[in-house]
Structures are given as C-alpha cells and as structure tokens.
Image (spheres, rainbow, N blue to C red):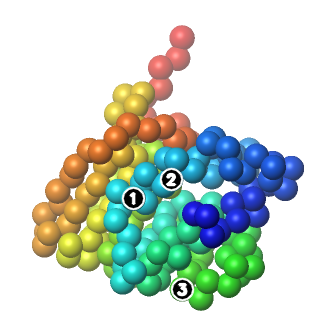
Amino acid sequence: MGQVPREIFVPEDRSSLAYIDAVHILDKGTGRFLSDPTTFARLVQLAKVGADDRVLDVGAGTGYSTAVLAALAREVVGLEADARLAEIAQTNISRLTPSNAQIVSGDEAGLGDAQFEVILIEGAVDAIPDALLKRLTDGGRLVALIREGGVGVATLVQRTGDDFQREASFNASLPPLDPRPSGDVFVF
C-alpha cells in the first residue's frame, strides 16, 4: 500500500484526504466508493494473496485496490460495473504501468470462464453470488464483507472440490457494493 499513490484514485478535490481512514465517495450518482485503508488492508490480509495467485477484484472503482493487489499477485483483473469508473480505473492503472493488471467493465459474465485463486469483493454484500464461488479454483479463497443485520462480517470462503468452507473473521463497515436497496427496508 505504501508503493501505490492513493491520492490519484480519489477525486482531485479530495486528494489531500486520500490517506485518512475513511471511505471516499468516488461518484455520488452511483454510490461507488474507495474503501478505507484499514478495512481494505485487513481484507487483503485475510485473503492471503500470494505471488502466484490470479486475483479477481470485484468492485474495482477507480483502480486503487487493483493496483495494490497487482503488487502482490501474478495477475489481477479488476471488475467494475460502472463503465465510467472502469475507464478511470484503466487510465489510473496504465499511469502506474503494472503489466499484470487489467480492468474489465460490466458484470462477471464478461470474464468468460476465467477462474481465480483469490476473489476480493470490495463492498458489503447480503450474500456471496454462486457465480463468483464457481470462479474459485480448488483451494481458492474468496473474501467478502457480508451484512448480518447492521453489521458487516469479514468472511473467508475457501473452496475444496465442490465444498465451500466459511470462516467469519472480524466486524467492519463498508457501504454496499450495490447501493440499490435490497429486499425489505425499515421505514417509519
């Protein structure tokens, strides 16, 4: 994290605040964000990214997480649903010239049949999509912040054959990966 200039991944008017331990909103219209440094670091640590790993970074935003992961892994694919943010991420990544990182715009269907040793989901989710679990190689690890009530629980999922073992690790707070309301919402 010390090698990747975080300030180039946040809106220019907030570059002086890039290193504070806070979530940075990248686009108010979409609700997309850049994770706070501490939570992101703990999620990466939980994933145990190795030099031989192929990593899928779901919710890449403006590319910061993809750039950091590229310094740790053999190859990183940053997946960003918002086309405009994906374009910004690709520009940011190319400025840093990591040849082992790429940004894919859209959803996971655009990845073909690619499989990964590590999948990191950048945002809170209610559940881990089966489509992502199927992309894990045997022995692969997926890390996600799963919402349980009002609390997010960092969860490590490890694949062994067709079995997926889950292990809760720590509580944290991140905005949802998909900011659209899901299911029942309490209103008074």
Name which residue type carries label 3: Asn
The quarter holding residue 149 reads top left
The tag on residue 100 is 3
The quarter holding residue 153 reads top left
User: Which residue is at 74% across, 69% downward?
Assistant: 88
Helix or strand or loop: what does disc 2 sit on? Answer: helix
Q: For the residues carrying marks 3 and 1, which lies nearer the camera in this image? A: 1
Locate the N terminus by quadrant: bottom right
Q: Is residue 83 visible?
A: no
Within-10-Å neighbours for mark 1: few <14, some 14–19, many 20+: few
Inter-mark Cα distance, 3 to 1: 20 Å
Question: Farthest front residue?
Answer: 2
The quarter holding residue 44 reads bottom left
User: Which residue is at 54% across, 41% downward?
Assistant: 175
In-image side of 47 versus 10 (left or right): left
* Residue ID for mark 1: 45
The tag on residue 40 is 2
Q: Residue 30: percent from the left, percent from the top? A: 68, 49
Q: Is residue 183 above or below residue 141?
A: above
Name which residue type carries label 1: Gln
